[in-house]
Amino acid sequence: MGFNAKRHLEKIQLVEEHVRQHKSDIAQHPWREHYHFQTPVGWMNDPHGLIQFQGQFHMFYQHHPFSGKWGTMHWGHAISEDLIHWKHQPEALAPSEDYDGWEGGGIFTGSAIEHQDELILFYTGCAQDRQVQCMASSSDGYSFAKSNHNPVLADPPSGINPHDFRDPKVWRQGDCWYMVTGVTDGVSDLIEPSNVQRNGLGKVCLHRSKDLKNWEFINYLIESRGELGTMLECPNFFPLDGKWVLMYSPMGLHDCQVVYLTGDFDEKTGKFHWQTMGSVDWGFDYYAPQHFRDDRGRDLLMAWVGSWPFMPWCRGNYDTSDLGWYGSITLPRQIRLCPDGKLASEPVFEIERLRENEKYYLPCVIHESEAFPFIAGDGVHCEIIASFDLLETSAERIVFRLRGSKNQETKLELDLARGEMIFDRTRSGNISALKRKCLLESAGQSQLNIRMFLDSISIEIFTDGGRTTMTNNIFSSPESNQLSIYAVGGSTRLLGLRTYGLRPSVIG
Ligand code: FRU
């Protein structure tokens, strides 16, 4: 049976009506982000289908419009001229067919390509008994028809769990199309250590096609032997600065949320020989990044700011689902490969368009136990750029006190003695009483540069020349807006401090 366009349209109209009715209920909540993209109503996760088509950036995302919790998945849609100002569009895809219409599943994560003047989406149809790869196309970029050939890829290679075969990322190379998907040979959603025997080994499948409709299995790009995760969600595979990068979101890899591997692709065998492994971001709330290249040749990443209840550190944490919404998208980050095989990223320059109220602070010494208060916009929606002279620093730790008030504070500790960066949300407010830490390479160097973006609830941090990033949500009250720096165990020399307020960016 062919695609039921009428039923699909009716489903989309239901969403649009629901969004129209409910968007003003939540728009004014103080925890709604100002310049990080969010869906107007409901739950969102993974951004995907990122592409420039007919002069516009398109972003699609996993969307459950009807509540603030994950549920039957749809594809939300937004467009932008500059990657920063986004405009909401009607829902792009809704569950309507046997292969993607299951209430407990729906239209899962995928990707976009342009072919013969059409915008073509690939997605996983999540039915009750299996996950299959599907295609939908549009000539205007706004209304999509599912292919009558769906599912274009129904069966995973033998030995793979058909319930965990998802997240197709498609690209063109030579005269062929390639697709990577994430799979497991066991059970993926049992992260409990007691279920460890039933947890499988994650793999990334590589398929190839000449016509987008018939797909041939080439090989597993990588196969975990326990070190790469039990299920590898949202794989991305792309060339970058002379190497290949495989990026994915592993399940069952402790607190490692987004892995990248850099190395060499053997096109003959379809194997990926990786040499370097790293974490794309070290925060609690960073998952499922998607890569795309824009017409300036920039390699860009956007990811979900959020986390899954299956992640051990989420248990007991506050989230906004009861307010009727959840999730946001990171700032677009431009990535590059460093000579040692590590990735570095920085927000795209277009973010500067949101800046206002610039402030400079002159270089000075911050003495032990002497807080250095400063202003950045309203203290809640702002950008902070600081550098420290570590040759003139005797302190063991430099601490940023963010979103402070009488009862609340969020601490970012730059621990020079231990060479670590620690994000401490123990006193941020609500139930997110946890710390995250990662290596801080610059601790051993002569200068430490750091850049932070604070929004209503998210904080994105970039340091070590972009080699270390951390993204976390905090749920502080809007009145918690004090900012200061202090030094512990000695003094530090602040070389420069520049701050900006940041204006809202979503334009309806
Ligand atoms: C990743 C993910 C994907 C899946 C989607 C479902 O966050 O679990 O693997 O396609 O979310 O919403």
Image (cartoon, rainbow, N blue to C red):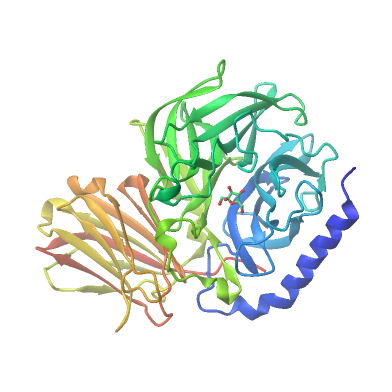
Please say if 406 is above or below 265.
below
Left/right placement of residue 160 relative to residue 377 reads right
x, y percent for residue 361: 27, 67
Residue ID at (56%, 71%): 321
- Percent coordinates x, y for residue 217 in the rendering: 65, 25
Q: Is residue 40 visible?
A: no
Quadrant in the picture for residue 445:
top left
Which of the pair 324/265 is nearer the observer?
324
Q: How many marks?
A: 0
Please determine whether, in this image, residue 481 is positioned above or below residue 56: below
Taking depth in this image into account, of 192 and 217 the one nearest to the observer is 192
What residue sits 53% from the left and 70% below the top? 34
Judge from the rendering whether residue 336 lies leftward or rightward of residue 367; answer left or right: right
Q: Which quadrant of the figure contains the N terminus?
A: top right
Residue 163 image position (x, y, % from top left): 64, 43
Image quadrant for the C terminus? bottom right
Relative depth, front residue between 196 and 122? 196
Q: Is residue 368 visible?
A: yes
**Farthest residue in the top direction?**
268
Q: Is residue 354 left or right of residue 149?
A: left
Give the quadrant of residue 497: bottom left
Residue occupying image coordinates x 39% and y 36%: 227
Choose top left, top right, bottom left or bottom right for residue 183. Answer: top right
Q: Position of residue 366 (x, y in %)?
A: 15, 67
